[in-house]
Amino acid sequence: MNCYMRNQWVLLLGFIFIFSNCNQDKGNLDASFLHHFTNKMLEISMEDIYSPPVASRVFVYPNLVCYEVMLNAQGKSIMNQLDSSWNKGLTLDTTNVNYSIAAIQAYCVVAKKLVFSEFMVDSMMTELKIKISKYPTKVQKKSLDFGDVVGTKMIDWIKKDNYAYVKSASQYTMPQTDSTWIITPPNFDKALEPNWKSLRFILLDSLRQFYPPRPPVFSTIKESEFYNEALKVYQEGIKQDEEHHSIAKFWDCNPNEYFTSGHNTYFTHRLSPAGHWLNIAKERCLEGKLDFYNSSKVYASVSIAIFDGIISCWNAKFTEQLVRPITYINRNIDLKWTPFIQTPPFPEYTSGHSVISGASSTVLIHYFGDKAFTDSTEVQFGIEPRTFNSLTEAADQASISRFYGGIHYLFGLSEGLKQGRSIGKHSVDRLELLSK
């Protein structure tokens, strides 16, 4: 064979190789597609105006099923260890299944069941079909079918998480004592999710696990510890420290902030604390160039820690029922004092923001180390990004921001951080064990 003919054969074989790879490619989707869908879920959470507890539930189950499917590719499962009946009736032919496609499909199937704006998830599923259109038809069908089956199985498990009871049980009755929480201005909302502690947790052992120590003894005596803790909040508030106000606004994360202007009332929608930390997780995955499997693991880990953390925190809140600073200060220090940010409608102790930040940062430190980073989450709301020397520093600042904002005592923050960090470590340890 002469040189010309040999070169022609080489060229032809090259075309055949490329064509074959295009039509038989079974590689995982790029992780950027999972990050894109994370952005979509964050958008939905703002569109549907989910409270922090509800947002944690909307985020956790799609991320858990996504990671579950990716584990299935290795012959592993978390769910069959969390639910002894998980494998019952779950017989699947995995031939030609692309697990990353199946994982995204399962993610969408579960997400659609949890959100109000189902049309937004429909558009995500359409995006997926367009994304995989170059895969072989049999791979597309088998992968989507696999995702449908596992997603439907997850929905069955979700139905048993006690959410129906949580939403229908009797509402909170405020005890008539000086030490207990009452509704607060400016909009005087009723107690938010007082029955959330009855929701099924995922990796905790019990509600008593990581329960915080009792707060300082309530007192209105000026020499008492409690009075002095409230006085610190008041003194911080009247300082009008610009940098502290900047920190408070950056971490405010009020999903439905209330404003009045003259006779007009309006609301702005932003990410909840859970959404803020999920976005930080996304940015760390992008920065670390994690692949699809490892990104799904990070999202599941952070989401579970937040979900269990909020259940644990809300258990403490509605057990201790501690009065908020605005109520105590108005009654005992200054009748006209108001906090810099709006007080959310639930008891003080412990701080939910601190629990979420402690739990999330601990999980992310496990995967990425405690390195410096820039958080651009709030840029979309016209707030400049902030750079931190470490994830620990970010969690500490997120926590203290609630003191700067005038809505928490310092002891509610410090104990909340401890609670969250313990839950974060527990979540990582348990998930690593279940994933083996």
Image: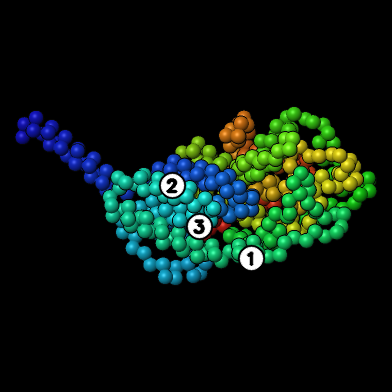
Residue at 36%, 64% (x, y): give it: 92
Secondary structure beneath disc 2? helix
Which numbered disc, 2 or 1, marks the residue closer to the eye?
Answer: 2
Q: Closer to the N terminus: mark 3 or mark 2?
A: 3
- Determine the CA span between mark 2 and mark 1: 31 Å
Give the amino acid type for the residue marked by disc 2 in the picture.
Ser
- Determine the CA span between mark 3 and mark 1: 18 Å
Name the residue tied to disc 3.
113
Give the amino acid type for the residue marked by disc 3 in the picture.
Lys
- Disc 1 crowd, CA 10 A, few/some/many (<14, 14-19, 20+): few
Percent position of residue 39, x then y = 51, 42
Name the residue tied to disc 1.
165
- Direction from residue 193 to residue 134 in the image, left or right: left
Name the residue tied to disc 2.
123
Asked if the residue under mark 1 is in contact with the one under mark 3, i.e. CB atoms within 8 Å, the reply is no
Asked if the residue under mark 1 is in contact with the one under mark 2, i.e. CB atoms within 8 Å, the reply is no
- Direction from residue 229 to residue 134 in the image, left or right: left
Residue at 43%, 47% (x, y): give it: 123
